[in-house]
Image (cartoon, helix red, strand yellow):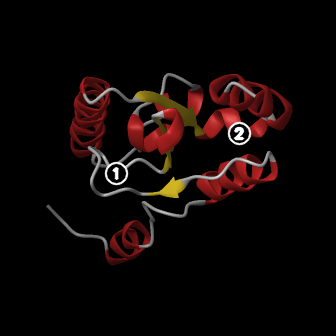
């Protein structure tokens, strides 16, 4: 397999924490007056936002990386399709295992997808419902 140095550099730059969608969600929730913990390593999957008093774990997932069923999540790169298909499927399996593990520990788990962030008004309504505000 030929390694493309430009693609490799691009992929190394992809962050798993403090992504733009995550920062948008954090800012919105903070403005609602709710406080949270970030990336708790003692919980399965190290959720992006954790609300211990509510036993709520939130993940802010990128549609492409986690294989969401929206148009962006369904899109595959034109090159190295087999690799990306396997990688995204592994992510989906890991996400499901994480969800089950957290639920077994008594946590409520919710995923906020990158595509849902575009509609801020709806996002705020959904978050208020999750938080029982």
66 left or right of 116 in image: left
Residue 67 occupies quadrant = top left
Pinpoint residue 42: horizontal percent, then vertical percent: 27, 54
Who is closer to the viewer here, 36 or 2?
36
Residues at marks 2 and 1, CA–CA distance in whole angstroms: 21 Å
For disc 2, the marked residue is 117
Is label 2 in contact with label 1 (beta carbons under 8 Å)?
A: no
Who is closer to the viewer here, 91 or 8?
91
Which numbered disc, 2 or 1, marks the residue closer to the eye?
1
Is 21 drawn above or below residue 102 in the view shown? below
Q: Residue at left 28%, top 39%?
A: 91
Q: Residues within 10 Å of mark 2 (few under 14, many from 20)?
A: some
For disc 1, the marked residue is 46
94 left or right of 116 in image: left
Q: Secondary structure at mark 2?
A: helix
Which mark identifies residue 23? none
Whichever of callouts 2 and 1 sits on the residue coming sooner in the sequence is 1
Q: Secondary structure at mark 1?
A: loop
Q: Residue at left 27%, top 35%?
A: 98
Q: Residues within 10 Å of mark 1 (few under 14, many from 20)?
A: some
């Amino acid at each position: 397999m030929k390694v493309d140095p430009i693609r490799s550099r691009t992929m190394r730059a992809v962050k798993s924490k403090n992504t733009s969608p995550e920062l948008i969600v954090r800012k919105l929730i903070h403005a609602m007056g709710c406080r949270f913990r970030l990336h708790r390593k003692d919980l399965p999957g190290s959720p992006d936002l954790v609300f211990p008093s509510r036993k709520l774990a939130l993940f802010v997932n990128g549609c492409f990386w986690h294989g969401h069923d929206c148009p962006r999540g369904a899109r595959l790169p034109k090159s190295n399709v087999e690799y990306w298909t396997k990688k995204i499927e592994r992510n989906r399996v890991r996400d499901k295992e994480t969800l089950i593990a957290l639920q077994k520990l008594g946590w409520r788990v919710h995923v906020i997808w990158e595509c849902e962030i575009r509609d801020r008004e709806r996002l705020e309504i959904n978050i208020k419902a999750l938080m029982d505000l």
